[in-house]
Image: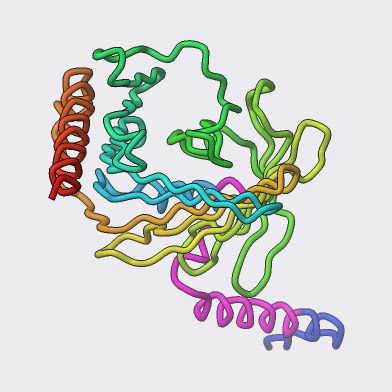
Amino acid sequence: MKTATIYSLPSVRKSLLTVSVIITATFLQAFLPAGVQAQTTAPEILKAMDKVLFAPKDKVLNLEMVMTDLNTNKEKIKKAEIFQKGADKKLFVYTYPPSDKGIATLSLPGEMYIYLPMFKKPKKITNMADGNSLNKSDFSLEDMATKPYSERYTPKLLNSTATSWELELKPKDPKASYSKLIVAVNKAHHYPEKIVYFDKKGQKLKESSYHFKKIGNYWVSDKVTMTDLKKKHKTVITMTGIKLDQGLSDSIFTLESLTNAGVAKKTEKKAEKKAARNENKH
């Protein structure tokens, strides 16, 4: 004769509670936004953000940079044509104001060159620190770095809301310009929504905000606003005419190409001046 198994009431309750927890967790997991399930730790979230930022193979765009002194509301505007391939090849060709036309810069892995019409040949930039301003804007060379965040910072998850994660990023390089960054990462699409920059004393130094739009299969930033809280100065970068995965040749990112781009814009500048003089004569 078989003996019936006898369960105590506490053990039954414990088993039912365990099953309930498992079912609830599985149910909630199934209804999380796509991609959220896997990115739950700080390193995974940061790598997912990098994947979005560096997804396109190459890009071509027109850039407008509006710099505003918040004390006087005076504005300065600069424009450029940008060519970028991968994470470490970038050609800037300045088109406005007229005084900048003909200036071009080339960024390559570990080095940077500038073409100035007065020199008539490229010059390697050897003494520019990462904290230096980019063309007198509120962005530093470090802010515009194309090296992934996950390679430059150690992340820590500070907070999680319904729509975003908040990460604290500590620089791996002790010579970095900032003591830390606080980044809000969009949960649905993994792009950065806002970054707060802290100086070496731990004080808020700058804030940036981002607007992203979807182009093809990519989420791409088309507007970035950087505000220097101490200098009371703001720079807004707007990108238009964005073209992705154009199959850009490596020959675009050479010293010869840098020179040709600068000379071409300088020639345009001369032609515009000549046309303006002829118009004034009439």
In this orientation, which residue lies closer to the viewer: 228 or 160? Answer: 228
Residue 93, position as x, y percentages in the image: 28, 35
Image mark count: 0
Q: Can residue 66 be found in the magenta stretch?
A: no
Task: Give the vertical position of 19 relative to 104 (above or below).
Answer: below
> Splitting the image into 4 quarters, where does residue 254 fall?
top left
How is this picture coloured?
rainbow
Residue 170, position as x, y percentages in the image: 69, 37
In this orientation, which residue lies closer to the viewer: 161 or 205? Answer: 205
> Splitting the image into 4 quarters, where does residue 7 fall?
bottom right
Magenta region: which residues?
Answer: 15-44
**In the shown orientation, is residue 17 left or right of residue 281?**
right
In percent of the image, x 68 and y 44: which residue is there? 197
Q: Can residue 26 be found in the magenta stretch?
A: yes
**In the shown orientation, is residue 141 left or right of residue 257?**
right
Residue 36, position as x, y percentages in the image: 51, 66
In this orientation, which residue lies closer to the viewer: 266 or 56? Answer: 266
In which quadrant is the N terminus drawn? Answer: bottom right
In percent of the image, x 24 and y 64: which residue is there? 216
- The secondary structure that most of the magenta stretch takes on is helix
**In the shown orientation, is residue 245 left or right of residue 179?**
left
In this orientation, which residue lies closer to the viewer: 264 or 247? Answer: 264
In percent of the image, x 26 and y 37: which residue is there? 85
Task: Give the vertical position of 153 relative to 279 (above or below).
Answer: above
In percent of the image, x 71 and y 42: which residue is there? 231
Residue 48, position as x, y percentages in the image: 47, 52
